[in-house]
Image (cartoon, helix red, strand yellow):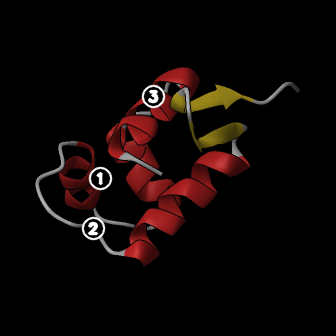
Amino acid sequence: MTPAQCRAARALIGLTQPELAKAAGVGLSTIVDFEKERRVVSIKAQAKLQETLEKVGIDFIPANDRGVGVRLRKS
């Protein structure tokens, strides 16, 4: 998951950074720093964020010749 995918995923479901931090069990500064690319965030923290977003209906589109992306899974 890229920082841009994290921001886009949150926007799709209307989730704030503090809400994602609480749901994923990570610090708010972890999300802020990750999304703004201020520092390298651990693979473990990134996995927690991605797993949390996937649980609420986000599909991550892996890199291909058209780029990367996210989409909201159909109910």
**Residue 21, percent across and down?**
39, 55
**Is residue 42 shown above or below 39?**
below
Q: Position of residue 24 (x, y in %)?
A: 50, 61
- Quadrant for the C terminus, please: top right
The residue type indicated by label 1 comes to Ile
Q: Earlier in the sequence, mark 2 or mark 3?
A: 3
Find residue 16 and report its image quarter: top left
Q: Which numbered disc covers residue 31? A: 1
- Asked if residue 33 lies left or right of residue 66, the reply is left
**Gap between marks 3 and 1, in whole Å?**
13 Å
Indicate the secondary structure of the residue bearing disc 3: helix
Q: Residue furthest left?
A: 38
| Whether residue 46 is situated above or below residue 17 in the rendered picture | below
CA gap between label 2 and label 3 equals 18 Å
Report which quarter residue 59 is drawn in.
top right
Residue 8's label in the rendered image is 3
- Mark positioned earlier in the residue sequence (2 or 1): 1
Q: Nearer the viewer, mark 2 or mark 1?
A: 2
- Identify the disc placed on residue 57: none
Q: Nearer the viewer, residue 46 or 20?
A: 46
| Whole-percent x, y for residue 20 in the image | 44, 48
Identify which residue, 4 or 54, lies in the foreground.
4
Label tally = 3
Query: What's under tag 2, amino acid-wise?
Result: Val
In the rendered image, residue 11, in percent from the top left (x then y), is placed at 46, 23
Q: Which residue is mark 2?
A: 41
Q: CA distance from mark 2 to mark 1?
A: 9 Å
- At a point 45% along the width and 37% down the height, the residue shown is 5
The kind of residue on which mark 3 rests is: Ala
Circles 3 and 1 in contact, beta carbons < 8 Å: no
Name the secondary structure under disc 1: helix
